[in-house]
Image (cartoon, helix red, strand yellow):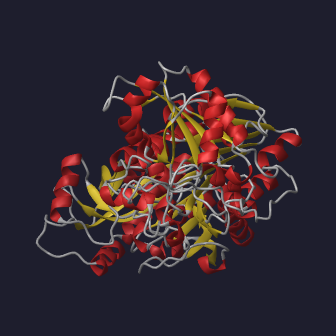
Amino acid sequence: MKRVIWIVLDSVGVGYLPDAAAFGDEGANTVGHIAEKMELRIPHMLSMGLGSLPGVNLSPSYGAGAYGRAMEKSAGKDTTTGHWEMAGVTVHQPFPLYPDGFPKDVMDAFEAAIGTKTLGNKPASGTTILDELGEEHMKTGYPIVYTSGDSVFQIACHEDIYPVDKLYEMCEIARKQLQGKHGVGRVIARPFVGTGKGHFTRTGRRRDFSLKPIAPSILDVLKEAGYETLGVGKIEDIFAHQGLTGSNHAAGNPACIDATVEYMKKDFNGLLFVNLVDFDSVYGHRRDVEGYGKALEYFDARLPEIQALMGDEDLLIITADHGCDPAFTGTDHTREYVPLLLWKKNMVGQHPIGTRETFADTAATIAEYFGLPERFGAKSYLKEIEAECEEEMRRIQRAADAVEQALGRADIAIVLGSGLGDFGNDLTNATELSYDHIPGFPHATVPGHAGKFIMGDLAGKRVLLMSGRFHSYEGHPMEDVVMPIRVMARLGVKKLILTNAAGGVNVDFCPGILMMITDFINLTGKNPLIGPNLDAFGPRFPDMTYAFDPALRELTKQAAREKDIDLQKGVYCWMNGPTYETPAEVRMARFLGADAVGMSTVPETIAAVHAGIKVLGISCITNMAAGIMREPINHEEVMEMGRKVRDEFAVLLTCVVGKM
C-alpha cells in the first residue's frame, strides 16, 4: 500500500514572487510578516526545514525532512489557479477579473434566471459587504453579489431568507452562465446568519463552484490508473468534483484535520488531497495576524498525529496555493512563493530541494511516486526526496562496511575523552583506521581527539576504541555527533564505555578523581532522536530510566574495589559549549542535582540506548567548574589533568573490560 498525504495550507505564502509588482504585491510575505509580529511556535514544520527558506524570519531548527519553495507559472494568485497548477494543470490565460463589478449584460442575465434583483455588484471584503448590505438583503430578499481581487462571483444570502440549497441552486445557475470570456474561476456560495449590522457571520456551509479543469490533472491520472483519490475540504469544489473517488467536505481547519486523520486510519492505496482554508478565509482576508499565527500553531501541534499514522510507503507533502499576507495592504490574495515541506518515515536530517519553477513539479513527483509516466510539463523531485530519505542509513552502512573491512567487528567499544587518546597503546594486536578513510564520516576538530578507530585486544576481549569524538559545539549536526555510535551498532557492539573529561560541580570532588555516571541532565535543548525515528535502530520513545546500565555499574564498582581506585558516582550535566560554564550555570546545575558538567557523552548515550547498546559512563574530573575555585579554566589544563590520571583510568578500564 502506497499513499501520498498532500496538505495545502491555503494562502500560506513565503515571500513575494519576482513578478509580484505586476499584481500589486511587491513586498508581501505571509509567513515572514507573521513571524515579525509574533513569536511563532511551529517546531514540527521548522524541523522539516521551513526555517531554512529565505525570508521567512524563522530560525532554522534541527530535524528531518526535505524543504524548498515553488513559483507559480500560471497567471494568477487565486485558489483555483494554484490548486490546478500544483495538480498539473497550468493556466496560461488568466481568469477574468472585475475590479468595477460585473457587466450589465452579465447581471441582467443572472437576475432574469433567478427571478429577482440583486444587491452589490462590486469588489468588497466578505465581512464588510455584509455590514453594508446585510440588513437591506433581509428586507428586500435580494441576493448580495460581489467579487474581489480574485476571479470570483460570490453570492451571499442569509440562511433565514434563502435556505442553503436555494443558494446553491443560484450558484449553479451562475456557474452555467459564466463561461467563455466571463468564465470566472469560481462561483462561491456565502451563506450567513445574524440579526443586523455588526452581528452577521458567515457559516461553514460555503460551497465553491469551479470551472472544470481545462486538462487532465493528477487526480484524473491516478483515478484512471485505479488508485483511490480522496479529497478533504473544498478540494472537490476546486476540481468540480472531477477525478475524485471519495470526498469529505469538512469545513474549517480542525474538522478537516480530523477528517484527514480518519482517512489515514483506513487502508487505501492512492492520494489524500487536503485543503485547510481557514488560513485564507478566516485570517488572511481579514488581515488578522495573530489569528493566522495561532492557526499555524494549531496545525503544527497536530502534525505529529498525522505523521504517527504514516506507513513506510507514505509520503507527506505540505504546500500552499498562493499567499494572503495578513500584514499587507488590502484584503486580497498576494502573489508569493509557496513552501514545499516533505516527510517520510526514516528520513534523517534536513535536505533542500531548491526553488521549483512551477507548482506542477509536485504533480510530476506524485505521478512518478506511483509509477505513472505523466509529468505535466514539469520536473519530478522524487529522486531527490528518496535519495535524502535513505541517504543517512546508506551513509551509516557505508561507514560501517568500511570499518568492518579494515578492522573487523567487536562486542565492546570505548569512546575516549579529552586527554585519554593514547589509551590505544594499551591494546595488543591493534589496527588503526583514520576517519579520513571512512566514507561520509565526520572529522574531529578538537585538540586531544585524534580522529581514528583502533581495534585490538584488551584483557582478552576484542575491543573497538574511538579516539576523537564529535561535539555539537563544533558545528556538527546531531546525526554526525552520534553517527559513530550507530556505526558501532552496525558492527555488533553490545556494550559501550563512554569516557569524558568533566568539570566538578559537587564541592566534595577534587580534580583527578574518577566519577561513574549514574544519570544525566540535558540542558542543551538538543536530542539526537528529534525528527522521524530510525526504526532500524530502535523505538520512537526509548526509555532512559536506566540509561547507564545497572549491571555494568555494579561490575565497575567491583573493579574499582579490586584495584583500590577511589571511584565516585554522580549525575553528569550536558551543556553545549564551547564556552566553559558560567558560575551561575554551575550553581543551577548543582541545584538540579548535577555532580559534574561537560560538553559530550549525553547524545552518544541516547543514541546507544536507542540502538539497544548497554552503556557505562565514566568521567575524569579534570577541574572544578567555574565559581568553585578562583582559577580560570582552560583546555590545556583539562588535557594535562587527563594525562595525569591516565594510568589509573587505564587500570580501571582494563579491569572492567576483563569482567564484561
Nearer the observer, 512 or 52: 52
Nearer the observer, 56 or 383: 56
Residue 659 seen from this side: no
Give the image location of residue 506, x and y in percent. 20, 55
Give the image location of residue 588, x and y in percent. 19, 53
Residue at 58% x, 56% y: name it: 97
Left or right: residue 618 versus residue 484 is left
Count of numbered circles on the image: 0
Nearer the observer, 263 or 444: 263
Left or right: residue 33 versus residue 148 is left
In the figure, residue 27 lies in which quadrant?
bottom left
In the displayed structure, 466 sits above or below 260; it is below
Nearer the observer, 10 or 267: 10
**What is the residue that sits farthest to the left in this orientation?**
630
In the displayed structure, 402 sits above or below 561; it is below
Give the image location of residue 476, x and y in percent. 48, 70
Rendered-image quadrant of the N terminus: top right
Residue 567 seen from this side: yes
Give the image location of residue 335, x and y in percent. 53, 62
In the figure, residue 96 lies in which quadrant?
bottom right
Left or right: residue 204 versus residue 168 is left
